[in-house]
Image: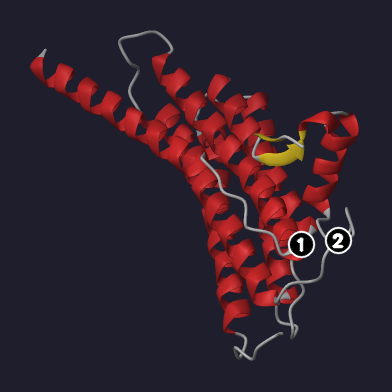
Amino acid sequence: MTGDDHGAAAERTRLAWRRTALSAGVVGLLAARPAFHPDAGVPQWITAALSGLGWSFLVAIAYRRARALMKSPPHPGRRTIAAYALTTVALAALASLVVML
Amino acid sequence: MTKSACCGCTFSTEKVNNSYVLGGLRQWIDPEKTPTVGRTPDYRFSLANERTFLAWIRTGLALIAGGLGVAQFLPPLPIAHLREIMAILLLVLGGLVALRAVDHWARTERAMRLGQELPGSRFPAVLAVAVALGAVAMIVAVVVQAAG
């Protein structure tokens, strides 16, 4: 059933997680950007802190999953996936807040 | 038994109730346990499904970054709040893409366990049309500005 692909599938998946974490970095930085404006106040600092938190969470999950994929044979992802998607949705909501502030 | 597709989930219409909705959410978190069905597929298929999910998440993240970029780098537009509305539309689209990504991943995982046909989806087509409409609107805006 599990053919020997010399870990290529797991490697591709690890790289996909890394790419995704890097993409999340762009969102995290853009969402934190208003906090560096000279007129920035407490709301901007709070949203920047929250976006930094969300980004760290996404990077941490991706790192953890990438490590789990080193095992052979790798287990399919489960909770990680839902957590990743829901954190992304939360970042979208936070970004809407940043836009409306 | 009539089958209908709503939110991309296939179910018998007689069973539309809260327990179905909760079951759907449980399936997101743990598609292997609820329901305990089928057999574990070749891990390479599961990983391919995971990569597809990640590609969709990146699409969603790109839309979110686009929304933030519109709000932060576009000059104020002649119509009041148009810039903010465009930004929010992109952000909502990004959030929808992420939600749909996890739903599609869970349904695909379940279908593979049951040895069923993989779920189809109109979502890519809908997203493509939405992006194309946005591009047309931008072209019109640029042409109008250049002419005026």
Residue B57 shows in the view: yes
Amino acid type at mark 1: Leu
On the rendered structure, is B93 left or right of B46?
left
Q: Quadrant of residue B134?
A: top left
Q: Identify the subunit bearing mark 2.
A: B
Q: Quadrant of the N terminus of chain A?
A: bottom right
Direction left: furthest residue: B147
Which of these two is toward me, B125 or A60? B125
Residue B121 percent across, percent down from the top left: 55, 44
Label 1: which secondary element: helix
Residue B37 tag number: 2
Badge 2 element: loop
Q: Quadrant of the C terminus of chain A?
A: top right
Is residue A29 found left or right of B38 in the rendered image? left
Residue A85, image x, y percentages = 68, 47
Q: Which residue is mark 1?
A: B114
